[in-house]
Amino acid sequence: MTEPEDHGHPSRPSLTTQIGNLTLKNPVLPASGTYGYGEEWLPFISPQLWGAVVTKGVSPTPWPGNEPPRICETPSGMLNAIGLQNLGMEAFAHKALSFLREYRTPVIVNIVGKTLEEYVAVAERLTPCPEVRAFELNISCPNVKEGGIAFGVDPKSAAAVTAAVPAATEKLLIVKLSPNVTDVTVIAQAVEAAGADAISLINTLLGMSIDIKRRRPTLSNQVGGLSGPAIKPVAVRMVWQTYKKISIPIIGMGGILTATDAPEFILAGATAVAIGTGLFVDPLTPVKVLDGIREYMIAEGFNSLDEIRGLAHRG
């Protein structure tokens, strides 16, 4: 399934989206970790549908992830503790990119690491790959040099890892922020000052489920990341607050499942949106979301996304 080009006619408004130097044909992306590397989704969604393909996390060496069970359903959402399982940067470069190379959709590689040096290593290794147009730093990872505290919960650590990567690559740099902080706008301002070209907001919220029959935590990791419709109000609030504090683009995410969810994020200030849990609920969610954005713009008389981005702040 492919997405036709938009030209801004009143009956077909333009969905073209600009994130730094990266031009996307539409503002809808898969959230990292939910679309894999795209191949397993071919029966439902072609990589050509997306504005860009955001891969699952890539580390310097393969990560096995956590022991199962590592996913469970919750009211209006799901908990996951996958543990960032991935095949490592070498296998990614040779296997995953060879598949994505067949399509003309820009690739945004999500980078994970346990030290600042690991983030830099992945960026250096994958920068020569022409399919890779941008990097998204997952700074919710534990910084082992600092005793396991996540990079993303401390402004100085977040800024340090953000500042280190541009020395290894000239490609667009997106930083994915954790919502598990007192004030996410402080982290957003820190990474903007350190050289981020855009931010992704939000990652999952920490949550937990207990199996009352086993009298044990449901997940082997005990805690996991909560996603889905339950976190959407939190995500919209954080996008709204952050939009007022920074000047770089925001990729909004968190509970986008329906045709009306994406316009809400864009009105709050998001430049683009990402779909995660919605893919598991219905693999055709991206189609419905794209149609919903277009239908909203036609109904309200907007010809481009620039006209509605952040409009709720001015309304």
Image (cartoon, grey):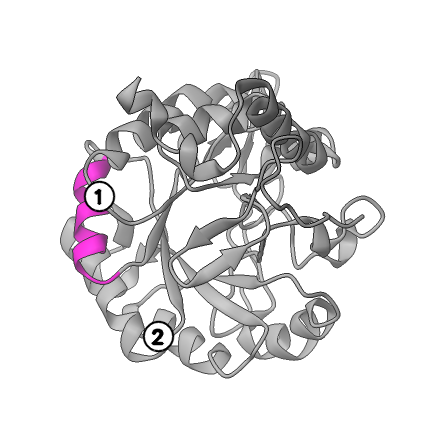
Label 2: few (<14), some or many (≥20) within 10 Å? Answer: many
* Residue type beneath disc 1: Ile
Residue 52 drawn above or below residue 163: above
Residue 183 locus on image (x, y percent) = 19, 33
Q: Nearer the viewer, residue 182 or 14?
A: 14
Specify the segment rendered in magenta. Answer: 184-195
Residue 4 lies in the magenta stretch:
no
Tell me the residue at 64%/25% (across/down).
Answer: 295
Q: Is residue 146 left or right of residue 257?
A: left
Does residue 191 appear to the left or right of 124 in the view shown? left
Element type where label 2 sits in the image: helix
The extreme right residue here reads 43
Residue 239 visible in the snapshot: yes
Q: Measured along the vertical axis of the image, is residue 35 above or below residue 225? A: below
Q: What residue type is labelled 2?
A: Val
Query: Which residue lies at the image location 53% right of the left edge and 19% below the top edge?
Result: 300
Residue indicated by mark 2: 120
State which mark lies toward you, 1 or 2.
1
Tell me which corner region of the image, top left, top right, bottom left or bottom right, holds residue 94. Answer: bottom right
Asked if residue 207 can be seen in this view, the reply is no
Gap between marks 1 and 2 measured at Cα:
25 Å
Label disc, if present, on residue 224 of the rendered structure: none
Q: In which quarter of the image is the C terminus?
A: top left
Residue 44 falls left or right of residue 166: right
Q: Are marks 1 and 2 in contact (CB under 8 Å)?
A: no
Q: Which residue is drawn at 42% across and 54% down?
A: 19
Question: Where does label 1 land, which residue?
Answer: 246
